[in-house]
Image (spheres, rainbow, N blue to C red):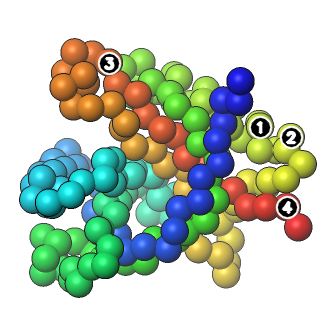
Amino acid sequence: MQQIRIIELPRMKVVKSGPIRTEQAFNAFNKWFSDYHASLPCQLSPRDFMWFNEREQAKEWIYALPTPTGADETDCGGYAVEEFPFGLYAVAVCKDADLDEAADWMKTQQEIKDWVESSELFTLHVNAEGTEERYPMFHIVTPGWLQEKGFSLEDMYVPIHMKE
């Protein structure tokens, strides 16, 4: 059975939290996106991703706006609206990092990287001058009511490219 799947995320408008360095900043974005998401008449879930921005040395939370959208920063709680760096991602499921101090999260991310490095088709994305910043990211895919019972899984996304 194949454990890693390849997903292409499209170019889309997203709302970014900016660097999250405090619990207050984390909670503020969580409240904004939860309220905004609950107000949508039709929901795709999950619409949010989180990554560690190496340049900023901080977590960033990203929320995919519904399309088409006319949203601007006034509609989005003052958070920045940006184009998301689209592309291919190698994806696998892992335990929520909060459940095991990120042990399975780190193991899964490394297994994806090892799989990509041994692939004949794909190569890992490298952030460099002239490339869009893309980082490994995740989102929780378990419904909230199951998370409250101590069961929570995440999809781990690692940015990749086709080999030339």
Q: Which residue is drawn at 40% across and 28% down?
A: 153
Q: Residue at x 45, y 52 (%)?
A: 51
**Amino acid carrying mark 4 in the image:** Lys
Is disc 2 in contact with disc 4, using a CB cutoff of under 8 Å? no
Q: Residue 10: give x, y in percent of width and height.
A: 51, 68
The residue pinned by badge 2 equals: 118
The residue pinned by badge 3 equals: 151
Is disc 3 in contact with disc 4, using a CB cutoff of under 8 Å? no
**Amino acid carrying mark 3 in the image:** Phe
Q: Distance between the residues labelled 4 and 1?
A: 14 Å
Relative depth, front residue between 93 and 108: 93
Mark sitting earlier along the chain (2/4): 2
The residue pinned by badge 1 equals: 115
Mark sitting earlier along the chain (3/2): 2
Mark 2 surroundings within 10 Å by alpha-carbon count, few (fewer than 14), some (14 through 19), many (20 or more):
few
Q: Is residue 117 above or below residue 33?
A: above
**Amino acid carrying mark 1 in the image:** Trp
Q: Distance between the residues labelled 3 and 2?
A: 32 Å
Q: Residue 139: give x, y in percent of width and height.
A: 40, 43
The residue pinned by badge 4 equals: 163
**Amino acid carrying mark 2 in the image:** Ser
Is disc 1 in contact with disc 2, using a CB cutoff of under 8 Å? yes
Q: Which residue is drawn at 77% across and 37% down?
A: 115
Is disc 3 in contact with disc 2, using a CB cutoff of under 8 Å? no
Q: Residue 47: give x, y in percent of width and height.
A: 33, 54
Under circle 1, the secondary element is helix
Q: Is residue 72 above or below residue 88?
A: below
Left or right: where 158 falls relative to 31: right
Which quadrant of the rendered structure holds the C terminus? bottom right
